[in-house]
Amino acid sequence: MPVKDSRIALAHGNGGRYMRELIRDLFAARLANPALDVDLDAVAVPLEGGEIMLTTDGFTVQPLEFPGGNIGSLAIHGTVNDLAVAGALPRYLTLNAIIEEGTEMALLERVVDAMAAAARECGVAVVAGDTKVVGRGECGGVYLATTGLGLRQQGPRLGPGQIRPGDRVLVSGPVGDHGAAVLLAREQFGMHGELRSDAASVLPAAQALLRCPGLRFMRDPTRGGFATVANEITRMTGLGLRLDEAAIPVSDPVAGVCELLGYDPLYLACEGRIVAIVAADEAGHARDLLESSGAAPAPTIVGTVEDAPAGVILQTTLGGERMLDELEDDPLPRIC
């Protein structure tokens, strides 16, 4: 490719020829989207009409590459997922890349290639962006920031205000895979395994759930994991949640990593899962929709919304109860 440097230099962010070549020959060429005009300050995109939904996010994962993905695919999937669980069909993304001086060009190529593949998979286009280069030691190699634009799809109106006592809590698959995979990828604990991140688009699963009339709410449990989403629901609604620990899917490798290192899998990040609240009489239907669509690996009903003071109660496998408190300290920094 025309970009011949093996590492990023500060000149790649100075607004001159090196920066222009980096954007043109790496980002624009590999994202391969005709609407990505690197000469304009703003771009016009067609929309069919309807209610527009907008999201923005930042990504600072360490290490930049991990089993199951890298920061590039994570950025696309994470942005698409935020729109999908809000009931939107993602269409367009913008990208801001902050790159550290000295970053290997080959690594950056892998990140952008993964980003392009994820965008094609999700049916979205990166249509605008910006690039900055900072000095050595001023960031963790590559930081990415995105904005996502989509159209709200037909279906039930979603939000915490729709949640009612008696509703059921559904999880689309095993929790904690991403956080545990990143832990192993850091190799600072002397542990190795075959565990892969669950990082993926949840758009197919979200679209399947939107066909359920009793769907009330969806959220993707990223930073802080499933337990944090559960606490957010109780905070937003003023209602309680009662969860069944035995019903919450946790894979054996994740459980093993957490047991050895003292982490709680319920607080570890997921990057390809949905937590949904569904009317009690539609919960089985919602689970069946996910199973029949093939969009979720193990959808499970794991709890109930209660007309009780806000808080999350976990019925343990030992027959007792404990509160799942809101996360205060970050148990695993920089995982998304």
Image (cartoon, rainbow, N blue to C red):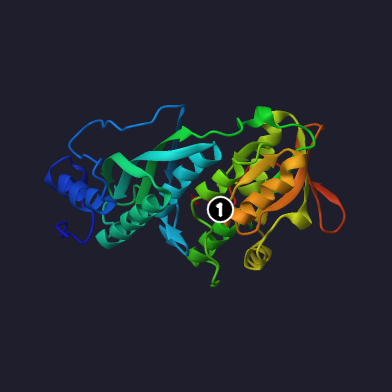
* Residue 63, image x, y percentages: 43, 59
Give the residue at x 35% y 51%.
142
Give the residue at x 20% y 33%.
40
**Residue found farthest to the right:** 319
Q: Which residue is mark 1?
A: 332
Give the residue at x 50% y 44%.
81
Position of the N terminus by quadrant:
bottom left
Given residues 183 and 235, the one toward you in this image is 235
Q: Quadrant of residue 219?
A: top right
Residues packed near mark 1 inside 10 Å, few (<14), some (14 to 19) or many (20 plus): some
Amino acid type shown at disc 1: Leu
* Residue 336, image x, y percentages: 48, 49
Q: Is residue 327 visible?
A: no
Give the residue at x 36% y 52%.
120
Q: Could you tell whether 80 is left or right of 31 in the image?
A: right
* Residue 252, image x, y percentages: 66, 67
Q: Could you tell whether 174 is left or right of 152 in the image?
A: right
Q: Could you tell whether 299 is left or right of 47 in the image?
A: right
* Residue 68, image x, y percentages: 47, 62
Given residues 73 and 292, the one toward you in this image is 292
